Image: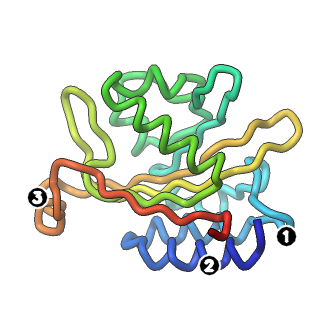
Amino acid sequence: MSQFAVDRAFAGFMNAISSPALKEIAQHWRDICQADGLPSWKDIRPAAIKKHLPIIWCYDYDPVQDDFIGRLAGIGITGVSAKPFKGTRLSDLRPADIYPRSLMRAKRVVQEPAFYRGHGVVYKTADQRGFGERIVMPLRAEGQVPAGIFGASEYKSRSEWFRVATDPNAEEEEWFSLRGT
């Protein structure tokens, strides 16, 4: 992964993000990048993104179980789920019909690696939908800490989303590869 590939992908990623809060979170990820590649969990500086902590979430990737495990989530994220986030597998947090897509998306962010931006229906259960914008960025493994994903979701009101959505029933995806291809 070249510095040029990271810079190019990040520029496209930032240009695609519409939320000022999500732009600040993405910029923090870029600011903590290591010279030799991706940042790790220990590089994140919560004080630098303090006002956005309610909308941030992180998962660790467990390659043995081929699943992600909730590491941390702000109140804006945990407040939309009846299940605890920390320590819970993605397969247990997401409905069975949504989980395969969620897993595929999270694995691509970690394994390619790539940035992800989604907008539209960014949270869905049998009972509710969350409309807005979501970003996901890769974190590298370091020592005993596995690779993971660092993300944030900003929700909008349903009426506000319907004014701007091209498909109000789906999440539109944008990918920005860090491989340089």
Tag 3 residue: 159
Q: Is residue 107 above or below residue 179?
A: above
Residue 154 pos. (x, y %): 37, 56
Amino acid type, label 3 = Ser
Q: Secondary structure at mark 1?
A: loop
Q: CA distance from mark 3 to mark 1?
A: 43 Å
Apparent side of residue 57 relative to residue 2 in the rendered image (left or right): left
Amino acid type, label 1 = Ala
Q: CA distance from mark 2 to mark 3?
A: 34 Å
Instruction: Name the residue nearer the viewer: 87 or 52.
Output: 87
Q: How is the image coloured?
A: rainbow
Instruction: Name the residue nearer the viewer: 81 or 138.
Output: 138
Which residue is rendered at x = 59% and y = 56% of the image? Answer: 137
The image quadrant of residue 25 is bottom right
Which residue is rendered at x = 49% and y = 35% of the image? Answer: 103
Of tags 2 and 3, the one toward the viewer is 2
The image quadrant of residue 61 is top right
Q: Secondary structure at mark 2?
A: helix
Q: Earlier in the sequence, mark 2 or mark 3?
A: 2
Tag 1 residue: 35
Tag 2 residue: 8
Of tags 1 and 2, the one toward the viewer is 2
Of tags 3 and 1, the one toward the viewer is 1
The quadrant of the picture occupied by the C terminus is: bottom right
Apparent side of residue 148 relative to residue 77 in the rendered image (left or right): right
Q: Earlier in the sequence, mark 1 or mark 2?
A: 2
Q: Is residue 101 above or below residue 44?
A: above
The quadrant of the picture occupied by the N terminus is: bottom right
Apparent side of residue 138 relative to residue 42 in the rendered image (left or right): left
Q: Earlier in the sequence, mark 3 or mark 1?
A: 1
